[in-house]
Image: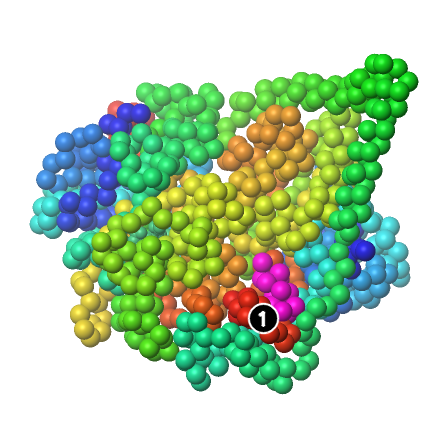
Amino acid sequence: MEPEQRALSVVLPVEPSRLPELAAALAAMGVTVADASRVFGDVPGLHFARLVMIPSGDDGRAWLALETNFDGPLDLHLDALASRVAPRARAVFACCSGFSFDDPRGSLLAGRLPERAFYLGHQGLTVETILNDRAVKRALSELLDDEISQDPSLLREGVDPRPVMQRVLGRLRRERPELELGEVPRPMHDAASFHARLWAIALFVVVLVLSGQALHPWGGAIVVAALLAPIVALAIAVLRAERGDREEIRDRPIRAYTRDELARLGTIGLIEDGSPQNALTHLVTPKPGRLRAGLLRFVLWGVDQLGKYVYRHGSLGAIPTIHFARWIILDDGRLLFFSNYDGSWESYLGDFVDKANEGLTGVWSNTREFPPTTLLAFDGARQEERFKVWTRRNQLVTQVWYSAYPDLSVRNVHAAARLRELSVPTHRRATAREWLALL
Amino acid sequence: MNRGELQAIVASGFGGRGAARYVFVRARTGSRPGDVRAELATRVLPHVVSVESEKPPAFAQLAFGPGGLRALGLDDDELDTFPREFVQGMAHPERARVNGDRVDEWHLGVHGLDVLVAVFAGDDDAAAALEADMLDGAAHLERACEPLVASRLPGQREHFGFRDGISQPAIEGVHADPRGPERPVPTGEFVMGHENVYGQLPAAPSLSRERGAGLPDSRVSPGRVDLGDDGTYLVLRKLEQDVFAWRAWLREASRPLAGHVVDPEAYLGAKVVGRWKSGAPLVTCPHRDEPDHALDNAFDYDLDLSGLACPRGAHIRRTNPRGALPPSPPRSRAAVETRRLLRRGRPYGPPAGEAPDGVERGLVFVCLCANLSRQFEFVQQTWVEGIKFDGGWSEDDPLVGARRDGADRFTIPREPVRYAPRGLPRFVTARGGGYFFLPGMSALRWLLDERRR
Ligand code: HEM
């Protein structure tokens, strides 16, 4: 089964001469989530969205990028974007070459790019469910507060949790009948089918080796060698390329911002860290050559698979703070990263360094000026200061950014979902205790 | 590691010296860098002690804000080799955003602080005498404002009545005999020019070879010379404490607990701090204060992940979560090791009496770290002010939080019903502060060398 949540990435070409006009149009939309709500707030099932200006790359092409994370079918979503967002952001879309206000839907679709990797931190939970669960959590916490103020003996250690739960839950049902309680359908990516595929590949390899062995006494060994040879060749090529990278970067001081970069950081600094959630927009150029381009696509595919089938419960690797993230490769080859995350930039980047450095190093090791790596996945992001400076230097201003629930962390979303699931009558003490602990 | 190169405050808070004065100094308008250097070199430098120095009855430590470095003759490009947060200064809107500060409530360092001369002595008279000795009659230096005078509260308490200054990281190579089982933190976390937790040399300020003649070659900025070796950054914040609001809240908010715990006010206060008044940690003494355990520091939260003993939001659990954070205790400890602070603060203002007196009192919060954004600012922003800390919904540090964005709750997990008072007042208000560069002794002598260009 597929989750209901989907990603849409659209990049629309902009003549470089019109970039200042685009920047002004984006700035006119305001920088806060509340500002963005005026544009995106009534798009049904929309979790997060952003509009970002992509400055010209080496070949001079520039774009406007639109990111959305939404529930339900793409068709309905495109209709909503065409009928609600396009007219409100007219000045922005008017800067895009060939954008037609007679056919905004077609114009958006024409600029669609695939997500090379897409991660969602709360698979299967729609905006509607998330907002319902938030209301459930708030109401229950307040009801419990109220019960305690009427009867402080509830605070006695060791009271039976079940009647407390019964009372509070009963009040919720009476006072807030509109709230959904208990299990709701939660379609997620099917980990079993993923595991089945892995087994199938393993089985295929075993059959290959065995049939080689059946044909010739050395057959098995030859098949194994044939399978390993390309991997070894690749590793050698990678190690050689990395030696070059190391020399390229060795003489650069750690902190080396240009004046332009400092100015951009100044803008970002006054937008970032304003709410419990944050947006990161990051754009880098891959290292030249087919080897790097191929590796990059392969690693992104791997990250995508891991996100879908392995990290399904709110934590990408050991990073428990990402709502939605994606990597896109632009037509000029540049790698664009969008992340909607909880907490401060420093804590997010710190998690990258301390808890997920191999995965991220794997992706970004193939891009320019990345701190030197070993076999693509090692070192790299562990060079903490260099990595953070590199990230900052390639960070773009997220001009317009929308969140449907800016006050919720990924952990909040999961805890509230669990609370809602448990909010049905129970005779089990342990369940009642867990339920109370979530309040 | 040459300990004679470190200013003494890196190794010690001088707890044995009862008196401290934080004197904010600047160059007089029109004074030339050479004169400022010469005057600091003759009047202040002789009193600055290193870790190894014999400590005279009164002595000083010397640190510079960006304005101070400019007054010594560094130019903008040279300042840009310092971290961005240092160059901007604590009052800059971006820093205020990060730290959760409202600079309109400040009265110290609104326009930056140039030079910090911290004076330590056995008693206030000796400290004041040394300050006068160094600054009275100076031709090129002047006090930027009234000095902050630390006060001594009985039993090493802070104004809310809790024992302070217990938990400190031990530094490799600096503290010869680190107490307790805690692994000493790599030197580079607190001193530039040495390897940090990532096994790397911290980025450090540098100069061109011509301008910095006499300084050692930089190992992190090729082709340049290094100004950071054996130096670090010092964070100073003046934090006003509202003792009467604190007491009133304890009285009020502990009422529903009456009959369920032995001493509701003491219980509530301990839950907020994470230690009882004596210092005994909740993790080892969950039910009552046990002064025998006052200095316990070899504990962890890995057996108390739900916070039943020490609430997840308690001050000491937020500022040093040890093994409490996901995904697992060992990985939490490894990540937390990159966020340690070396605290060197002292209280200011008279002890609070029975009735509100309208007198300002609080904590001169001072800490050292080699990386301002990774260490101090992170702890302040993400752990102290972060309202989503460790799964929270809308809570900041119950003791020192600024209660931004409606964060006014504090959850005390209890079995089975938690107590989560709302409407927490602000007990602590930042009144100002600054970021300073605390140079190593050689760099300091170079900075104050009157003959250099
Ligand atoms: C007026 C404000 C403050 C008061 C009254 C205060 C009080 C205390 C007390 C009583 C302790 C326990 C004693 C100890 O472990 O040494 C403590 C520990 C600590 N505080 Fe504060 N504090 C204040 C502000 C801050 C701020 C602003 C920060 C950081 C940004 C901070 C960071 C720490 C740290 C890191 C510890 C040690 C925690 C541990 O290692 O277990 N404090 N504080």
Q: Residue at x 52, y 78 (%)?
A: A164
Q: The disc numbered 1 marks a residue on which chain? A: A
Q: Which residue is mark 1?
A: A428
Q: Amino acid at mark 1?
A: Arg
User: x, y (%) of residue A113?
Assistant: 81, 46
User: Does the rendering let one see residue A184?
Assistant: yes
Position of residue B143 in the picture relative to residue A291 (left or right): left
Tally of numbered discs: 1
Q: Does B54 sit above or below residue B145?
A: above
Q: Nearer the viewer, residue B304 or B186?
A: B304
The quadrant in which residue A136 appears is: bottom right
How many residues crowd around disc 1 within 10 Å: few (fewer than 14), some, or many (20 or more)? few
> Quick one: SS at disc 1?
loop
Q: Which residues are magenta?
A: A411-422
Residue A421 included in the magenta stretch of the image: yes
Q: Residue at x 20, y 35 (%)?
A: B48
Q: Does B1 sit above or below residue A414?
A: above
User: x, y (%) of residue A171?
Assistant: 58, 83
Q: Does A89 sit above or below residue A54?
A: below
